[in-house]
Image (cartoon, coloured by chain):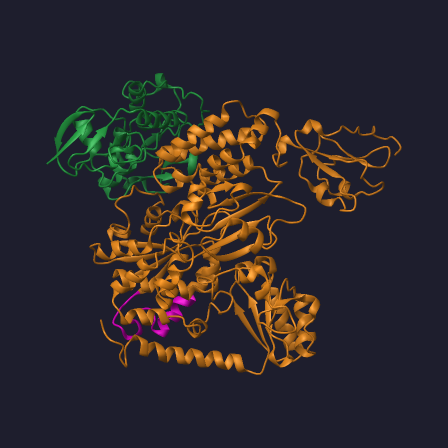
Chain colours: A green, B orange
Amino acid sequence: MAKIVIDGAEIETEEGANLLKVCLDNDIYIPNLCRLETDETPHASCRLCFVEVAGYKSPVPSCTVAVTDEMVVKTDTEPVRRLQKTGLRFLLSTHKIECKDCPANKQCELQDIAKFLKVGLKPKGLKQRFHETDVDERHPCFTYYPNRCVLCGKCIRVCRQEHGQSTLTFARRGIDTVVSCFQGDDIEKLPCEDYRACAAICPVGALEVK
Amino acid sequence: MNPPSDNGPQAVYAAIRAEADERLEAFRTAPVPRIHIGMATCGIASGAMETKAAFEEALAAQNIEAKIHSVGCIGHCYAEPWVIIDYPDSGFPPIFYHNVTPGKAKMLAKLFLLEGDPRFEHVYGATEENEMIPWVGEFPRFNREKRLITEKCGKVDPEEINDYIAEKGYGALAKALEGSPESVIQEVSDARLRGRGGAGFPTGKKWQLARSAEGGSKVVICNADEGDPGAYMDRTLLESNPHQMLEGMILCGYAVGAHRGIVYVRSEYPLAVSILRTAIDQAREKGVLGENILGSGFNFDITIFQGSGAFVCGEETALIRSIEGSRGMPQHRPPYPVVKGLNGEPTVINNVKTLASIPPIIENGAEWFASIGTESSTGTAVFSVVGDVVHPGLVEIPMGVTLRELIFDICGGIHKKKKFHAVQIGGPSGGCLPESFLDTPIDYDSLTDAGAMMGSGGMVVMDQETCMVNVSRYFLDFTQKESCGKCTFCRIGTYHLLEILHRITIGEGEEGDLEKLETLSKDIKAGSLCGLGRTAPNPVLTSLAYFRDEYEAHIKEKKCPGLTCRPLIAFYIDLDKCARGCDACVGCCPTDAVFTTRTRKKGIDLELCVKCGECMVACPPEYDAVRKVSPPHLAPVVDRPPEGEKK
């Protein structure tokens, strides 16, 4: 057992437990997009779940922290919120705001996080940048919307965890990075007809079942 | 630990060494001239193949008996292609010739080798002290270096293991195998060697961690995924003396208890890959690699893995993913690779130069190594000094030498009439330092304090005609394109930095842009997942700190002080200098923007001009009439005479 302090409240938990999970389980909300309960190692790519841990110079992503006894954590400090807001603004600068037409509207995790951080959906001061292709129909079973995608990679990982290897993958580099599929695969052999966890897990409605 | 015995590693080695020595002796004492030619990629690119062919042809045609010895690179890029002609019977010492074209090669074969005239007008220097020809050891470019890692580069044939062995190669391995693995780690720790890949992590500590890590199949990886623009130290080492790195790798394997090594090398280095393959095969044949190395009972084998050229794969977790067959994307550390690396096994990843530093340390001892350099940064640093310097190339210096000594004393300073402006150290992760930092000693901590970093050894020197905003834009363009796209801050953050920098360079900068650059940079440094993102803003932050006036000139005056950013400059022709009747600029202009005025001088139609600068290059130096100005409205307007008017 480990006793830790989060935002002044004492919490008992397992030594080595994932700090982000501990916070969420104790109703302390920390913005996050890329964490999967089933991940063996933290993916740590959305860079939103920052917290301050005593002893660390700067904020750390809580999904990468294993709890140790007497750990002191703060989730609501100026440096934490600043990084979270910047991260969210970055994501919003590549996310087409067409909430009315989006099936994820009202269940969208980006909307929730923006509300929580009190950030508008239009990223102030940043030029928006979108992919040329709005709709990608190459996958036989799913429609992919690159300009909604936040590249959390959860779709890729649930697919891999279920089938041993993923039928989805990241493609291209830098700002052009997208989720893509291996073309030329025999559609008959893909497990996608019966298995749609990738679309279900998408936090922003970037993958839709056809 | 076994005491040295009759059939121990040292004894086995002695037999191999004797064979190599004998071979070398035969080569040295043969009564024929020897021609050493630098044949690394840099030499080949400058025409060394043609030079070698010209020698071969001339020797055959004139029936001259001589030996051609292909060696690697000595690091003197400005002199490529170079040869050393060692012709004892001529009465001259071995002579170093630079820029040896095929024509010069044929001439030297005939006049020197046949007729005994070394052609003094083409001599760069002698490689030994003598009374006839200045010795290169008297030139700063040669004598200010301290060569440990590159010592044998340019001396040995990289495809002939006996050359390396005759230079005491694999002697350190034989020595170490007589002792315990722990004593190897102790020696490396006492030498206080720090990782030469850039971050400077203590190598001994890394090895100790790997040794104590649990795992049945530990791995040693040599990181030769050199990707910084302008950096080519690792390539040169692998192409010139691969065995020193291989020996270091085997020593590392012995120290940490690994039996498997992988060289992760870029496939864009085909010559290095092919030379490495030969070297590994030869090492196996000699019994210094593979099973029961030098009769010690220790097994270690090395394979090559070719990376596909993603810059981020130099990051160790991405490198591991790449070997495992996945997309090269970094992972959160810890766990560090020394604990959980390739396929979950403890993995030591060291840079080429780190591994190549090991044999000299084992051979000469930790105390000797630690006496070179500074207290916190021991040993030497290898830099590829490129850009606007007189003597660019690969330079190995003791840590602690100042930037000024390196750039001005050793590399000859800036070309005539121009002034030093900045030096970029550490590639896309490093920073740009101004003149006021020239007295900074080159070591890990001083460079980091200055806002740059040691990096893996790329150094770009820039003269006054460089725009620092454009340099930042260039590096951000590089990191943005090379970002793996995994984490938000690097993928999107660097894009926004690039977008702002791009706007500034085309004259669309706005008030507040600089503050925005600063805050975004700080957040990207704090928020990114791996070293690539965390250091990507460094070129922006350092240039903003040291060259802020240049940014402000771009934004406020729409002026590029370095006269580089095309939308902010204009070309014109100085009518006082332009020569009547000369048409050099007219002929080279790709858009017919240069016209003849009524006075038969030239003018530039700014509407048509694409600012390629060709006219400036073409204008004969005795006129030197083409001028560049910024902002563009400063260019005097010269009217084009109406079409059809008599000139």
At 68% from the left and 46% from the top, the residue drawn is B417
Comparing A167 with A161, the one in front is A161
- Percent position (x, y) of residue A100? 35, 16
Q: Is residue B575 visible?
A: yes
Q: Quadrant of the C terminus of chain B?
A: top right
Q: Is residue A137 visible?
A: no
Displayed quadrant of residue A5: top left
Comparing B425 with A126, the one in front is B425
Displayed quadrant of residue B216: bottom left
B613 over B382 or under it: above or below: above
Q: Which residues are magenta?
A: B277-300
At 14% from the left and 38% from the top, the residue drawn is A15
- Percent position (x, y) of residue B414? 61, 49
Report whether A186 appears left or right of A73: right
Count all numbered tags in the image, as a single digit. Answer: 0
Residue B169 among magenta residues? no
Residue B294 among magenta residues? yes
Comparing B605 with A155, the one in front is B605
Report whether B512 appears left or right of B571: left
Work out which residue is located at the far top of the displayed protein and give it.
A100
- Percent position (x, y) of residue B278? 42, 67
B323 over B73 or under it: above or below: above
Report whether B324 appears left or right of B473: left
Work out which residue is located at the far right of the displayed protein and give it.
B646
Report whether A148 appears left or right of B417: left
Q: Quadrant of the N terminus of chain B?
A: bottom left
- Percent position (x, y) of residue B620? 77, 46
Displayed quadrant of residue A1: top left
